[in-house]
Image (spheres, rainbow, N blue to C red):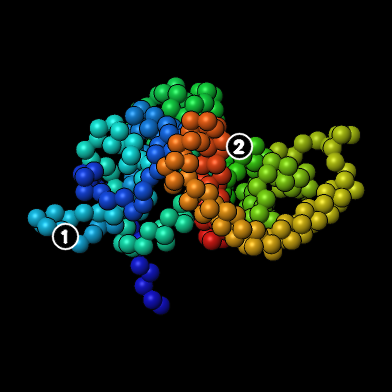
Amino acid sequence: MTEVKQAFEQRVIAIPIERILPSRRVEHLMCGSKKYASILCSIKELGVVEPLVVHPKPIIAGGVSSFMLLDGHLRLEALKALGAVEALCLISTDDEGFTYNRQINRLTPIQEHKMIITALKKGIEASRIATVLGINVDRVHERETLLRGIAPEVAEMLKVRMVSQDVFRTLRQMKPIRQIETVEMMISANCFTRNYARMVLAASRPEMLVEQKKRSTSEASAMDIARMEREMENLQHDYKQVEDTLGETMLVLVVAKGYLMRLLRNEAIAAYLRHHYAELLEELVTIIEAVTTDARQLERE
């Protein structure tokens, strides 16, 4: 069996910011976005939770090595804006930025849960975390206990999935084996909604639930459960049809995204939009980010 090459070194090091070379240009309009403002505020209050990803470049004149930035461009810009001289970095053994970057996704609920746990272990108060994330303290505590009652296998399968809090609440009502079956069905159907999870819960046998409640007149009958199972099969069939055309649809979106990016790189167009249609510009940037994320997710799957 061939040896599996590690993608990253097993240590995080502090690198002077002046030695980190961005692999792409960060547009001025990106630095004015809500995402950048959120990152700036988060680093200011909590520090860098997720290290930058870099790859060492050949030694340059003077015997000083530089590092190519693969992921974390907005974090780097935020550190510069805050006057930082060093950045915590994870060293990649692969210098192909696209290979790594296509694995990057939005912060998922489980990743956010881990970030909050890390911050709390550092002694940061929940109220301070809530201020940084723009949410109330109760939601911070909800996300802190997100995986309570969730099977480890389920957490592993959902760690890179965008899943709502309600889905986890529903899964907690099931025993671990049923949780795993439910998530496998969700992944197969590519559907991670609250209604899907509740439908599986309603169709679950009593012995597969954490609490076997007494049967009431309002509880679903065997006929209702059979109907919901048929609806689930139809839903999976519909998702399969959508999946068959997803590649072609995503190709069209990627082409359209490329056209939008070329337009926004034009300083005259970008300045005009910022001055006259700031909200439209922000929406266009959000769409570009969403299409990029969806394309990376499709490639990963």
Q: For the residue marked with disc 2, what is the amino acid?
A: Gln
Decide: is 114 above or below 5.
above
Residue 145 visible to the viewer: no
Where the N terminus falls, by quadrant?
Answer: bottom left
Measuring from the top left, give residue 45's x and y in whole percent. Answer: 36, 28
Measuring from the top left, give residue 176's x and y in whole percent. Answer: 62, 49
Label 1 vs 2, first from the N-terminus:
1
Q: Which residue is mark 2?
A: 165
Residue appearing at x 64%, y 62% in the figure: 248
Measuring from the top left, give residue 28's x and y in whole percent. Answer: 39, 39
Taking the image as shown, residue 27 lies to the left or right of residue 109, namely left
Q: Under tag 2, what secondary structure? A: helix
The numbered dot on residue 249 is: none
Q: Within 10 angstroms of label 1, few (less than 14), some, or many (20 or more) residues?
A: few
Q: Within 10 angstroms of label 2, few (less than 14), some, or many (20 or more) residues?
A: some
Q: Nearer the viewer, mark 1 or mark 2?
A: 1
Residue appearing at x 21%, y 38% in the figure: 85
Decide: is 236 above or below 73.
below
Q: Nearer the viewer, residue 154 or 269?
A: 269
Q: Which residue is mark 1?
A: 59
Separation of disc 1 and disc 2 at Cα? 48 Å
State the image quarter where residue 31 is shown: top left
Q: For the residue marked with disc 1, what is the amino acid?
A: Ile
Q: Nearer the viewer, residue 243 or 7?
A: 243
Residue 26 visible to the viewer: yes
